[in-house]
Image: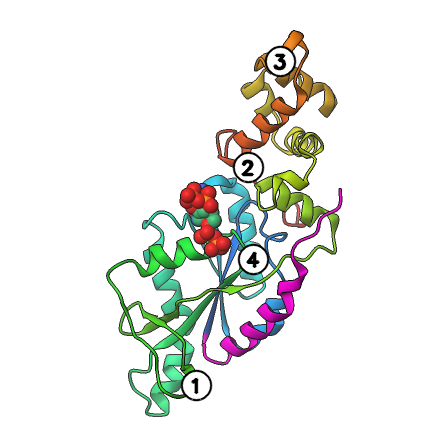
């Protein structure tokens, strides 16, 4: 399969991000916990050099808990602060707040030594489209906090959301774009539904999903669809069509309907908590 994703926006987005980076102390990067590598663009490591770094593994409600833990360790070992999150729920927000304070302690300490008092830590949310940036900002910032309005000088035109007396968040997230160097990236983004389905071959996509499930989540296809997992993916799709009554006029099996159904159930979490890619270290 071949994938394309609005490359025209890249240069503008990158320039904007470079500008915004000058204003902040902490980069809050959102990734999709189901595809923590495919949903991040490592360019942010260059752009966010010398900033404190926090990775939020968002949509953790849809991902395998075991794999989310492994990915957290993976990123922590690389020096990032990491929090798993369901951005739609307020529940994880205290953890985020605590980690922000922790990540910025060094900066606050530096300020204190220089006699600078009460200068809030400034943070910015970044991530590729659809990872939940706006949802996170809305939930995290909530109604309780106030917009600080435009500030004189360098921050002209920027809106900051005051989270508490120590932290301010830029109200517009920075948009990164996925990296398509590896074909798996496009495939993974397509599987989670971050690319337009019209341009994708749904049947082929569902076969890829079935292959990943068969290899990494034994029992799941059998349990949900009564499919024999020893069979090859096309055969499994056929069994799904049969067992879920996906038929066209004339009683012919409707593979495309079975393919859409399987993808839908995966994306909505009805198939279970599933992560599609795994850290390289042994499981
Ligand atoms: P973006 O700014 O990074 O582009 O992402 P945005 O917040 O628009 O979120 C994209 C979609 O992901 C939204 O769904 C949002 O509800 C959903 N989402 C965000 N965070 C989470 C999470 O932690 N878990 C789950 N399961 N979903 C999350 P949508 O279908 O586009 O809209 P809607 O269903 O909310 O109406």
In the picture of the structure, the residue carrying the numbered disc 3 is 247
- Distance from mark 4 CB to nearest ligand 1 atom below 8 Å: yes
Q: Position of residue 195 (x, y in %)?
A: 61, 46
Q: Is residue 146 visible?
A: yes
Q: CA distance from mark 4 to mark 3?
A: 38 Å
- Distance from mark 3 CB to nearest ligand 1 atom below 8 Å: no
Mark 1 is surrounded, within 10 Å at the Cα level, by few (under 14), some (14 to 19) or many (20 or more) other residues, namely few
| Front position among marks 2 and 3 | 3
Q: CA distance from mark 1 to mark 2?
A: 44 Å
Q: Are marks 4 and 1 in contact (CB under 8 Å)?
A: no
Residue extending furthest toward the bottom: 114
- Disc 3 is placed on an element classified as loop
- Disc 1 is placed on an element classified as helix
What residue range appears in magenta?
A: 1-25
Going from N to C along the chain, the mark reached first, 2 or 3, is 3
Magenta span has 2?
A: yes
Rendered image: mark on residue 154: 1
Compared across the picture, whether 106 is left or right of 178 comes to: left
In depth, the one of 211 and 245 nearer the eye is: 245
């Amino acid at each position: 399969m071949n994938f394309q994703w609005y490359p025209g926006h890249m240069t503008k987005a990158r320039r904007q991000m470079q500008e915004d980076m000058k204003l902040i102390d902490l980069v809050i990067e959102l990734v999709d916990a189901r595809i923590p590598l495919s949903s991040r663009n490592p360019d942010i490591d260059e752009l966010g050099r010398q900033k404190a770094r926090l990775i939020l593994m968002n949509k953790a409600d849809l991902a395998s808990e075991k794999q989310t833990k492994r990915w957290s360790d993976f990123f922590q070992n690389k020096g990032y602060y990491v929090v798993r999150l369901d951005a739609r729920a307020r529940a994880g927000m205290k953890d985020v707040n605590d980690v922000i304070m922790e990540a910025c302690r060094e900066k606050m300490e530096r300020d204190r030594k220089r006699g600078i008092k009460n200068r809030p830590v400034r943070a910015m949310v970044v991530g590729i489209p659809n990872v939940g940036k706006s949802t996170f900002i809305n939930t995290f910032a909530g109604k309780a906090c106030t917009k600080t309005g435009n500030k004189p000088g360098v921050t002209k035109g920027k809106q900051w959301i005051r989270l508490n007396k120590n932290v301010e968040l830029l109200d517009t997230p920075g948009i990164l774009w996925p990296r398509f160097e590896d074909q798996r990236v496009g495939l993974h983004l397509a599987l989670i539904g971050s690319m337009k389905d019209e341009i994708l071959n749904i049947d082929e996509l569902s076969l890829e999903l079935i292959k990943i499930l068969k290899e990494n989540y034994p029992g799941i296809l059998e349990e949900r669809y009564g499919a024999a997992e020893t069979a090859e993916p096309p055969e499994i799709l056929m069994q799904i069509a049969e067992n879920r009554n996906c038929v066209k006029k004339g009683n012919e099996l409707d593979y495309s309907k079975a393919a859409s159904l399987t993808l839908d159930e995966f994306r909505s979490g009805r198939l279970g908590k599933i992560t599609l890619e795994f850290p390289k270290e042994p499981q």
